[in-house]
Amino acid sequence: MMLPKLTKPSLAILSLLGLSACTTVGPDYVHPKQAPLPSDWSVQKTAKDTQQSEQQLQQWWQQFNDSTLNQLVELASKQNLDLEAAGLRIVQARSLLGISTGLQYPQVQTVSGNLARAYVNDQGVNNATLSFDAAWEMDVWGKYARGIESAEAGYYASIASYHDIMVTITAEVARNYINYRTFQERILLSRRNIETQERVVRITQVQFDSGNVTELDVQQAKNQLYTTKAALPSLEVAMKQSRTALALLLGALPEEVDELLQSDGMHKQIADYEKQFKSTGRKSALSGTDERSIVPRPPLLDTQVDANLVMRRPDLQVSEMQARAQSAQIGVAETALYPSFSLFGSIGIDSTVPDGSSFSFSDSLTMVVGPTFSWNIFQYGRVKNNIRFEDARFQETLTNYNKKVLQAVNEVTNAIEAYDLYLQQKDLRLQSVNSSIRAFNISMTQYENGQISFERLLNSVEKMTRAEDSYATIKGNVANQVVALYKALGGGWQTQTGKPFLSDSISKQMTERTDWDGYLNEENRVLPPLRLETPAENSDENKTEDL
């Protein structure tokens, strides 16, 4: 059967559709203006300088030269459950993008049929129908194009969110590991000082038995010993809590983390750390490098901030993409102001015969094809208010972006200032430790020779204990501020590009449950590069194309 010829009105409408096919209403997204940055931040860095700084950021934890920390970060990138959930959100966003893309094609493709029996004037008849219907709403005003734009921005926002979570997790792994080693060193110091104080108690008891001192001296020595011992359990609890936090970040059990933390190399380092006192009964002064310390040694930082790095933080990219997605929604809402044009077609067969007769489809073929349009001419107020609603939401996303920039500035500034102050405090604490150690060694010798009173010995022991504990704490604070600065700069997410964002086991579970048609193959689970957005320097207003 030949297809019917299109009438002149139909041809005119189709021509109009062809001429209007490139029109896209709504604002074209432009980046926000460059947010104000601190005056001492560098915004004119060359691409080479920025690239070198970015290379340092990519795997910043390796600058601690701690193999255990490197291993923990690597395991967290593979096993963390928050990262796993973020990877699944990427899959969801990609599916939504596929849905939006599919709307560009015929939206209705339906095969239907029925078989019915009816009674007309007590006469039974049988009816059979089978039809294929199709309808295609032409994207004259860019409704579906804007929808794809919004979905694509949402997809890249999910990628940026994955990277942002990676930045946070890496920083948390490093922070909890540093805290674990800091508490571990404080425990070792406490145990060493307990040994020292036990020795003081024994010496005082001998002096008391000889009648050289009173019982008050003995009890004061014991009081100091018991006070130091009482503080030990709280340090052990804090250390175990840091280990448990690491276990959660790694998606593992605490005993599994214990195996990683108690390596052969660490056992040797701890033995060397304790050796310095056990051999002589006296303590040696610490050097500026503090070679025997088990607290991870952070690198010295250049506190000159490259603004180009800060503006590449993944959380800023999330806000940027959310603004882009919402901008497109204004265009989607604006298309409702104009008529929608569609092409429709239907082909089918329909046969109705008296009861007892056979169906005959020889003359029942029907075919319908042609254009149509619809226009909500009485919904102007509703449509305009919906456009205003979407525009207000878009402006809110721009406000949130500016807030994120301000938060980034504050985080970087706080980290730099705290790092400088803690570094100064560390040097002063080291001097205090060395002075207190020398004072203890002198007072111990003089007390054994009867040259000073017991109070002076006790005082030197107490000051040394406090100085050593404070020094260990400040070393952990300096290391944690380095972590905080790298986190504030958004370091660490770059290394995940090109790696799977979903594990083989999860992919296998999903493919066994649902037909993914290759979407979860290994090559499709590789994390794509993040689309880095650059703020516009001149334009600050969205523009709408004139119709």
Image: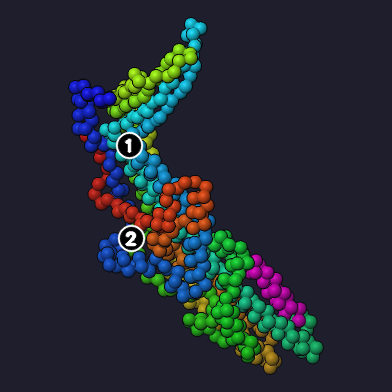
394 relative position to 259: left or right: left
Front-most of 375 and 168?
Answer: 375
Between the C-alphas of marks 2 and 1, the distance is 44 Å
Residue 289 position within the rendered picture, expressed as x and y whole percent measured from the top left: 48, 81
Q: Quadrant of residue 417?
A: bottom left
Q: Callout 1: 10 Å neighbours few (<14), some, many (20+)?
A: some
154 relative position to 457: left or right: left
How has the structure been colored for display?
Answer: rainbow
- The dot on residue 460 is none
Q: Is residue 528 visible?
A: yes
In the rendered image, the residue lying farthest to the top is 121
Residue at 73%, 83% in the rendered image: 201
Residue at 28%, 39% in the rendered image: 27
Q: Quadrant of residue 473?
A: bottom right
Q: Amino acid at mark 2?
A: Ala
Residue 444 position within the rendered picture, expressed as x and y whole percent measured from the top left: 65, 88
Position above or below: 453 against 41: below
Quadrant that contains the C terminus: top left
Is 333 within the magenta?
no
Q: Give the mark nearer the N terminus: 2 vs 1.
A: 1
Q: Amino acid at mark 1?
A: Tyr
- The dot on residue 105 is 1
Q: Which residue is mark 2?
A: 307
Residue at 27%, 42% in the rendered image: 28
Which secondary structure lies at badge 1? loop
Residue at 63%, 82% in the rendered image: 460
In the rendered image, the residue lying farthest to the bottom is 449
Q: Main secondary structure of the magenta part?
A: helix
The magenta segment is 218-239
Q: Is residue 388 visible?
A: no
Position above or below: 69 against 287: above
Is 224 within the magenta?
yes
